[in-house]
Image (tube, rainbow, N blue to C red):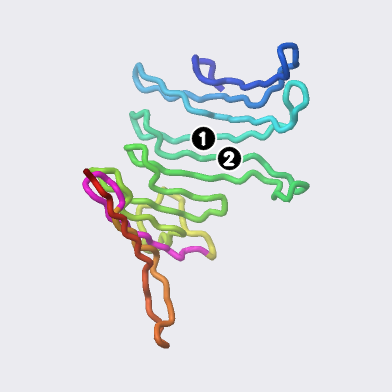
């Protein structure tokens, strides 16, 4: 996809013995992002050859597309287009996709899985420790999702896990998603709690 990615891995091959025939295992192509005099290269296609036939055959290609922060080398979103799994291998026969959104520090803040369900993470700005994570986000009550990302039909459980950490960013407390139990005949909401104590010198 670009010829300027000098020094980046292009192909992996294997062969049996000194005189064996080289069999291609993997091939990579790259795309470039340039701001001023600075350029970064990121993987555009990653092809893995699933057959040991000479030269490699039966390719499975994962493709990546990117969006970038304005005037920055930091990616803002990345979409991963996964290889097609044919129905003969119990797959759907279509390519599934996964998407990730990043903050300006390179941390994943939102993900959209292959079924369209969303996850969200919040971080402490000082230590970088995770403050909160939400699985199966309900976008009617949680704001800030990337444009066009909404809770799919049947989703929206909004399972919130809260974290506390020390000054070094180490997690000291985890409170899991709220769920309901029968406590002496009364429906009672509870959260699973985990504490971690660090023994420092």
Q: In the rendered view, would you say 49 is above or below 20?
A: below
Disc 1: CA contacts within 10 A as few (<14), some (14-19) or many (>=20): some
Q: Secondary structure at mark 1?
A: strand
Q: In the rendered view, would you say 62 is above or below 180?
A: above
Is 169 displayed left or right of 90 in the figure?
A: left
State the quadrant of the C terminus: top left
For the residues marked 1 and 2, what is the alpha-carbon distance in whole angstroms? 8 Å
Q: Residue furthest top?
A: 19
Question: Relative to the observer, which residue lies in front, 69 or 178?
Answer: 178
Where residue 162 sits in the image (x, y, percent)?
33, 59
| Residue 157 is covered by the magenta coloring | yes
> What residue did someone put label 1 on?
65
Q: Secondary structure at mark 2?
A: strand
State the quadrant of the N terminus: top right
Q: Which residues are magenta?
A: 155-171
Along the polypeptide, which appears first: circle 1 or circle 2? 1
Name the residue located 75 percent from the left edge and 16 percent from the top edge.
Answer: 21
Where residue 196 sits in the image (x, y, percent)?
31, 55
> What residue did someone put label 2 on?
81
Name the residue located 40 percent from the left edge and 20 percent from the top edge.
Answer: 39
Q: Are marks 1 and 2 in contact (CB under 8 Å)?
A: yes
């Amino acid at each position: 996809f670009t010829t300027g990615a000098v020094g980046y891995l292009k192909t992996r091959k294997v062969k049996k013995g000194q005189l064996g025939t080289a069999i291609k295992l993997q091939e990579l192509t790259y795309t470039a992002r340039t701001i001023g005099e600075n350029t970064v290269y990121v993987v555009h296609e990653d092809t893995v050859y699933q057959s040991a036939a000479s030269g490699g055959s039966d390719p499975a290609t994962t493709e990546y597309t990117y969006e970038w922060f304005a005037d920055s080398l930091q990616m803002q979103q990345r979409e991963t287009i996964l290889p097609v799994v044919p129905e003969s291998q119990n797959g759907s026969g279509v390519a599934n996709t996964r998407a990730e959104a990043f903050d300006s520090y390179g941390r994943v803040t939102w993900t959209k899985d292959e079924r369209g369900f969303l996850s969200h993470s919040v971080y402490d700005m000082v230590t970088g420790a995770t403050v909160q994570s939400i699985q199966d986000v309900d976008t009617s009550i949680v704001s800030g999702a990337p444009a066009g990302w909404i809770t799919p039909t049947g989703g929206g459980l909004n399972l919130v896990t809260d974290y506390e950490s020390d000054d070094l960013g180490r997690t000291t407390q985890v409170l899991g998603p709220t769920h309901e139990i029968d406590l002496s005949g009364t429906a009672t909401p509870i959260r699973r709690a985990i504490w971690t104590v660090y023994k420092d010198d």
